[in-house]
Image (spheres, rainbow, N blue to C red):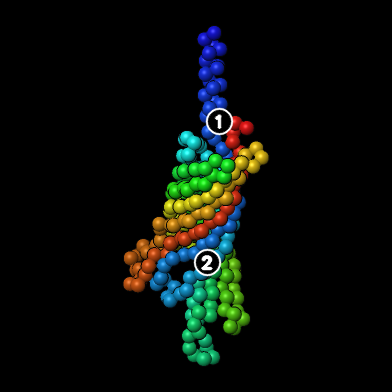
């Protein structure tokens, strides 16, 4: 009888805990740019469009409050319009050049989510994230003179003896590969099939400067280059008790 009671209690607890967990995939688009001034001279910042592919796990604390953990592959970066020196006119051509850099990242957000509603539920969410850049690619273009250069971006601890011509090597002593920031989001969800589908709009603010100045040689007019992201994604969540 005692063994049966223990098994019944264990079954009840496991069913209760399983009912609080949901998991599923996330797909979407990420719009990103970099803030900052002074490193590239006078530049106009622009946005780039990337992708989001990842997985989500949610733990419900009650009917409204839940914790969300994710692991996502995100492409992000930015583009800059800059002035170049025109040899023919012997003058600066205003905003005729464009530099674009796109990075492949692994991002780990942890969110607190508050949900209201019945048939269609609405929610707000907030929480920190950790981001690690794997590699990237760049493109430098001046349309006025029909010139273009593009290639890969690689992070290195020291410059290679035999560098590839189409690769831009970034020394991690001067460039920060990791970022920590905060996400703020809103969304809506409803039941669909065996689970529920959620549409999520999220704003990400990076806290760390992408550039490092180990010799304290920061320009006087320098303002930190920080990641800025707007992410629009869809997730489909499967409750573990179904």
Whether residue 92 is visible here, answered yes or no, is yes
- Is residue 55 among the parts visible in the rendering? no
**Is the Cβ of the residue at disc 2 closer than 8 Å to that at disc 1?**
no
Disc 2 or 1, which lies upstream in sequence? 1
Camera-nearest residue between 135 and 72: 72
Residue sitting farthest toward the front: 118
State left or right for residue 181 relative to residue 169. Answer: left
Mark linked to residue 18: 1
Which of the image's four quarters has the C terminus? top right
> Which residue is depicted at the point 44% across and 73% down?
40
Image coordinates of residue 121 in percent, x first then y, are 54, 44
Between 99 and 151, the residue placed more toward the observer is: 99
Q: Which residue shows up at 59% across the image and 83% down it?
A: 145
Q: Secondary structure at mark 2?
A: loop
239 or 193, which lies in front?
193
Q: What residue occupies the far top of the structure in this picture?
A: 1
- For residue 207, what is the image quadrant? bottom left
- Residue 140: where, in percent of width, then height? 56, 73
* Residue count near mark 2 (Cα–Cα under 10 Å), binned few <14, some 14–19, many ≥20: some
Residue that extends furthest to the bottom in the rendered view of this protein? 89
Provide the secondary structure element on which disc 1 rests.
Answer: helix
Disc tally is: 2
Q: Nearer the viewer, residue 148 or 20?
A: 20
User: Which label number is shown at residue 47?
Assistant: 2
Vertical comparison of 45 with 144: above or below = above
Question: Residue drawn at (61%, 41%), measured in percent from left and top?
Answer: 191
Residue 194 point in image, percent of width and height: 65, 37
Q: Quadrant of the N terminus?
A: top right
x, y (%) of residue 214? 36, 62
The residue at 55%/65% (across/down) is 48
How far is the residue under mark 2 from the one under mark 1? Answer: 41 Å
Name which quarter of the figure residue 112 lies in. top left
């Amino acid at each position: 009888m005692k063994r049966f009671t223990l098994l019944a209690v264990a079954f009840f607890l496991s069913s209760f805990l399983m009912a609080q967990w949901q998991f599923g995939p996330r797909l979407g688009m990420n719009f990103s740019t970099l803030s900052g001034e002074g490193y590239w001279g006078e530049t106009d910042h622009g946005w780039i469009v990337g992708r989001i592919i990842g997985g989500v796990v949610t733990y419900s604390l009650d009917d409204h409050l839940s914790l969300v953990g994710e692991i996502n592959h995100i492409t992000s970066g930015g583009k800059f319009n800059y002035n170049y020196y025109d040899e023919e006119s012997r003058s600066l051509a205003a905003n005729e050049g464009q530099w674009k850099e796109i990075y492949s990242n692994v991002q780990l957000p942890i969110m607190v989510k508050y949900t209201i509603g019945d048939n269609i539920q609405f929610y707000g969410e907030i929480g920190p994230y950790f981001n690690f850049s794997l590699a990237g690619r760049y493109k430098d273009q001046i349309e006025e003179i029909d010139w273009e250069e593009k290639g890969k971006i690689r992070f290195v601890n020291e410059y290679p003896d035999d560098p590839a011509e189409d690769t831009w090597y970034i020394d991690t002593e001067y460039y920060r590969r990791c970022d920590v920031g905060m996400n703020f989001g809103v969304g809506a969800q409803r039941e669909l099939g065996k689970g529920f589908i959620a549409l999520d709009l999220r704003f990400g603010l990076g806290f760390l400067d992408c550039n490092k100045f180990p010799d304290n040689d920061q320009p006087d007019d320098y303002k930190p280059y920080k990641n800025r992201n707007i992410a629009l994604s869809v997730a489909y969540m499967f409750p573990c008790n179904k």
